[in-house]
Image: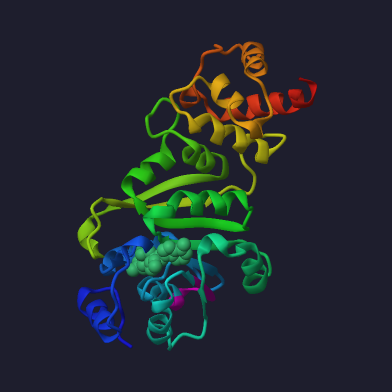
Amino acid sequence: MATLGNPANTGEVLRKYNFSFQKKFGQNFLIDEHILEKIVDVAEIGDDDCVLEIGPGIGTMTQYLCERARHVIVVEIDKSLIPILEDTLSEYENVTIINNDILKVDIKALTEEYNSGRPIKVVANLPYYITTPIIMGLFENHVPLESITVMVQKEVADRMQVGPGSKDYGALSLSVAYYAKAVPVCVVSPNCFMPRPNVSSEVIRLDVYRESPVKTDSEDYLFKIIRASFRQRRKQLANSLANAPETGVSRETVQETLREMGIREDVRGESFTLEQFAALSDRLLKKRGNQ
Ligand code: SAM
């Protein structure tokens, strides 16, 4: 099987299998060798690494990964791509192909099975319609991770790197800031994909912290508070939190806590730093039973 990663060979595989792209799965396959090499380079894949690739498509990037890693696990939702992957990856013995929805896969169990529970590297040209749940799911399910190197929509890469005060600031920004250091790699033109997407893309690497620089008594509660704060962006924080039953706090309790912290009662989530969210969350958690 020829090396993929250029339009001619990709086209040949698609014709051989009479493959038709499914928009609902966010299928835009990479056809640029420079970008493929760049992704595997910045992911720093070495021969002791176990890599998880989310959405391998026809196996283009998988071939590059298999050349460098000890083991590669790919999870692909589209069952019509499985026979293609078995063909394009037939010469590699270090690959495991799983036909499933990544959001339903127990990734922690895979790290146990293929890497004795040690941290793995995630590399992917992500399906753009579920970028946020994939990234936040990897973090919040405490999958042992060394890094996540992904192609995402440029606008989403921006959201991963901004701080308070920006219109792009939200739960994804805070999740990335809490769990990882974001390293932007390069912006990628729509011409590098087949079919061309309508938006620009960006490769970003997230180096996962062993321990977050921000401390909290409960990560679970912190992210309940963060999600609730951005569910109604334009509302004051006290109202957003009181309107979300899972926080278990009243408007008055939030306002009182903000006063104790020396913060204006009418503050909005979009101007709150990660450290402030952690401090608020710890205080609210303590008060929850005493209302
Ligand atoms: N990695 C390939 C490449 O770069 O050419 C394909 C990338 S394409 C942007 C996204 C891939 O993710 C597609 O193959 C699509 O079928 C797959 N996909 C979409 N949703 C998925 C899901 N929930 N779980 C696993 N794979 C998914």
Taking the image as shown, residue 259 lies to the left or right of residue 78, namely: right
Q: Residue at x 46, y 26 (%)?
A: 270
Seen in the image, is 231 located left or right of residue 219? left
Image quadrant for the N terminus?
bottom left
- Front residue (pair 23, 261): 23
**Res 40 visible:** no
In-front residue for pair 247/220 = 247
Q: How many marks?
A: 0
Q: Up-down: is 277 above or below 96?
A: above
What residue is drawn where x is 61% and y is 24%? Answer: 242
Residue at x 33% of width, y 43% of height: 155
Q: Examine the image and state in which quarter residue 27 appears.
A: bottom left
* Coordinates of residue 80 in the picture (x, y in percent): 39, 78
Q: Which residue sits at x=56%, y=32%?
A: 228
Q: Which residues are magenta?
A: 66-74
Query: Where residue 192 sits in the image (x, y, percent)?
Result: 24, 62
Using the image, determine if residue 145 lies above or below residue 93.
above
Image quarter where the C terminus lies is: top right
Left or right of 123 on screen, residue 158: left
Q: Is residue 239 above or below residue 88?
A: above
Residue 262 seen in render: yes
Residue 72 belongs to magenta span: yes
Image quadrant of ligand 1?
A: bottom left
